[in-house]
Image: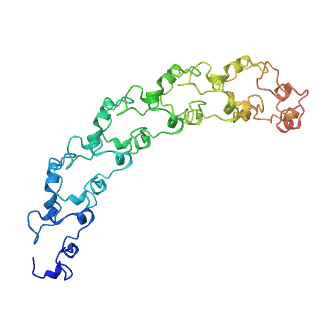
Amino acid sequence: FPTTCATCHTTTAWQPAPYDHNATQFPLTGAHKTAVCSDCHADGIYKGKAITCVSCHQPDFNRAQTPNHTQAQFPTTCATCHTTTAWQPAPYDHNATQFPLTGAHKAAVCSDCHADGVYKGKPTTCVSCHQTDYNGARTPNHTTSQFPTTCATCHTTTAWTPATFDHAATQFPLTGAHRTATCNDCHANGVYNGKPTTCVSCHQPDYNGTKDPNHAQAQFPTDCTPCHTTTAWTPATFNHSATQFPLTGAHKTVACSDCHADGVYNGKPTTCQSCHLTDFNTTTTPNHRTLGWPQTCITCHSGGSNTTAWDAGVTLPSQYHTMFSVTHQGARGDCTQCHNTTNYAQSTCSNHHHPPTCTYLNQRGCGD
């Protein structure tokens, strides 16, 4: 000690002799304020006394068992957890580590994650603590499904369950009704990793069981998307314009069975008579079969140019009336005005005009 007695003593009384520790490199705080000198200086060392916590608290560090400081290789910087206010409790700021605590982790006790006594260099991966949860999961079975052990993909620290999976991050984003399906609806077979993404991989029973029309018999492709959508399996629509027979006119309003009652879809003929042969055979005014007319229905029906209507606008093309318009003498398209219903052979003026004295014939030098 220095011989400057006034540092501790006063002229009022030699004893007691108070010492202002705050004037040193180790100001007293908390419980240190009530300690007696011998608590820290029992070794008789005052000048140059070490000011690190462990210089006094090494015995506390060595005998600590919950957790075992020595085994866990804790640093001897006691102030990391302990304060001078009270040695216990000793809170630890986990947020200062590489694994900040969030969610339910905040309420966990140290032994929940460190029961193995490992603190220093403890792995920070989810599975390092949750391997047992991973192995025991059955809905779905994580092991047989070959799920990755990156638990955070589905689980959160807020709660282990319920667990959510972002299907949009896969090769099969969910749309329409698929969004409300349960995992088991598509993965009842336990296959998750490498699950096929084709429609038929899930909808083969629907394909096989469909009878109106019979998909298997009609040899429909198993790519369900040309007709079905994920919004609703039915009704199903088919874009006929993408085929070799785009629908026009009255064909747009017919039902599939009107043309495909025979169950033939794949390779269905596109000629008129393939559907209208019965119409051709049964027509008597005029009788198409008796007259030996060709079966190219479009020649006369629907104005010879479209599918607007079968009976309206029946018109013969110009090659059948090279001399006269079908409006000749007011016929106005009524074949029977000039033709016997059983004979549509080439007609001449003299067949209908007696004597044939029409101006046209005279001009042509046909005589009288």
Q: Position of residue 132 (x, y in %)?
A: 29, 34
Point 69% across, 18% down: residue: 278
- Which residue is the extreme one toward the front? 13
- Which residue is the extreme one toward the left? 44
Point 66% across, 35% down: residue: 248
Instruction: Evaluate whether residue 200 shows in this view.
Output: no
Which color mode does the image show?
rainbow
Q: Position of residue 312 (x, y in %)?
A: 78, 31
Point 12% across, 66% down: residue: 50
Instruction: Evaluate whether residue 11 shows in this view.
Output: yes
Q: Position of residue 26 (x, y in %)?
A: 19, 70
| Quadrant in the picture for the N terminus | bottom left
Point 78% across, 21% down: residue: 286
Residue 295 quadrant: top right
Residue 298 quadrant: top right
Residues 247 and 368: in front is 247
Q: Is residue 166 left or right of residue 249?
A: left
Residues 117 and 335: in front is 117
Q: Position of residue 304 (x, y in %)?
A: 71, 34
| Quadrant in the picture for the C terminus | top right
Residue 235 position (above or below residue 15): above
Q: How many marks?
A: 0
Residue 148 quadrant: top left
